[in-house]
Image (spheres, rainbow, N blue to C red):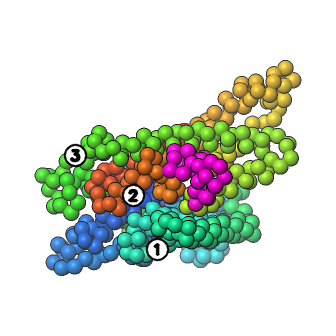
Amino acid sequence: MGAPLAWLVTRTNLPFAKLFKTLFILPYMIPPFVGAIAWSQLLNRRNGYVNRWIMSLFGLDRYVFNVNTLSGLVWVMALYLYPFVFITVVGALERMDPTLEEAARTCGSRTLRIMKDITLPLVAPSIAGGALLVFASSIANFGIPALIGMQGRVFVLTTMIYSYMHSGGFNGIAMASSLSVLLMGVSVGALLINNLYLKKKQYTLISGKSMRPTTLDLRAWKLPCLVLAAIVVFVTVILPFFSIALTSLLDAWGADITWENISLRNYRYILFEYKLTKDALKNSLLLAISAATISMILGSLIAYISVKTKIRGRKALETVAQIPYTIPGTVVAIAMILAWSGRYGINLYNTFWILLVAYVAHYTAFAIRTTSASLEQIHSSLEEAARISGGSWLKSLRDIVIPLIRPGLVAGWFLIFMPALRELTMSILLWGPKTVTIGVAVFEMQEAGYVQISAAFATLLLIIVITGNLIVKWLTKGKIGI
């Protein structure tokens, strides 16, 4: 999906191409487990909206689709992970040197041959890189396989680890730890292969001249391509949003969709009456704010040491700090349980602090990357001038460096705050009776059958997440990916 859609919005005269470019990225903003809930409501074999509509339309007496299968799991995964490929290929196509394509066109080559022999080989590293990112993300994902696969007895590594941890006892922990090592090896291996592949495929995509690639005139294909793009948006964005919003307004899951059965009662319940959801909002906000702040402080210090000093081992420090982000969240959670359950004298299990430590370990890499990018743009002569003028290191840091990198610090803080607010993969293994989070609350309510209340809480989370992502995009002005 990602590569053809990227080509359509960047290299053709597709109507509303800029709008579609934004809409195709929207699934990336949606928490995957929320998307899984939406598609479970749409294609559920008992009360799924799509199944009910098809059965009513054609007079059928049994369901047509069953999302709780391996193919259903692949379908939902693909819909929420294709933006990885889309974003990387769009970047490559927009920066490509168009002279090779223009030379081929001048020599009489047709569009399809140009795409096959020139365009595709040039963007192949970006396609492969995006595909490997999808592979690493899907194998580490917990929310979609748990909500879609487990109900149909379709297990993957992350859900098997979850099952073993909940089985209790030493054998369960041992099996979960063994699977975690396997999961870590596969995930890290995919990222290493990605880096190795990109090093070997170094094509010159960006030239020194400022030129826009030639836009292909779709002609008679313009309308069919516009319809195709609209269908993609409808399936990936509008239909899931509509499903989860509609369910959140129903008094009972599976009830007829009439005005009598629609109200805001579920929202009033989760915001003002239900203790679980009120605690989840409070805990997630506190965790996200704390994790973002601590991660930015640690990440900024590590980035400053790596970029602005000549201390021996600084690059090794940066590498070690970024390792937890390359490891699946499930593995990080298992490691936290084994390390902080009293074996080494400190017992943080079932407390707020074990969640905070896991979040900080996992998201500090965000802070390092955003701060490093900002620090590399500050010339060392500015700090040297301050020291020559008698200013101390702390004074130059306070009066020169921090004001200059403040936009990057703010953007980095939000880039950590937003995923921490909706985190599920680590939290589902680390939460305790008093430390339920938003992601865990949505998951537990969905699993317990409180579908309409879960949908209301998920809709609230969607509004918060999309608003936050728009704020990040505005703050970074598109320089840092959402």
**Percent position (x, y) of residue 218?**
46, 67
Give the residue drawn at x 31%, y 41%.
Answer: 271
Residue at 51% from the left image edge and 47% from the top image edge: 351
The 10 Å Cα crowd at callout 3, few under 14, some 14 to 19, many 20 or more, is some
- Disc 2 marks which residue? 443
Q: Amino acid at mark 2?
A: Phe
Q: Which secondary structure, mark 1?
A: loop
- Report whether residue 88 is seen: no
Label 2 Cα neighbours within 10 Å, binned few <14 / some 14-19 / many ≥20: many
Relative to 389, is 477 above or below?
below
10 Å neighbourhood of mark 1: few (<14), some, or many (≥20)? Answer: some
Name the residue at 80% across, 47% down: 314
Q: Identify the magenta region.
A: 334-360
Residue 469 horizontal/vertical position (percent): 48, 46
Which numbered circle lies on residue 265? 3
Label 2, label 3: how far apart the Cα atoms are: 20 Å
Q: Gap between marks 2 and 1, in whole Å?
A: 17 Å
Left or right of 351 on screen, residue 55: left
Q: Nearer the viewer, residue 70 or 439?
A: 439
The amino acid on which the numbered mark 1 sits, given as a three-letter code, is: Phe
Task: Work out whether residue 399 or residue 158 is closer to the camera in this orientation and state it.
Answer: 158
Q: Residue furthest bottom?
A: 61
Q: Is residue 373 left or right of residue 379?
A: left
The residue that mark 1 highlights is 155
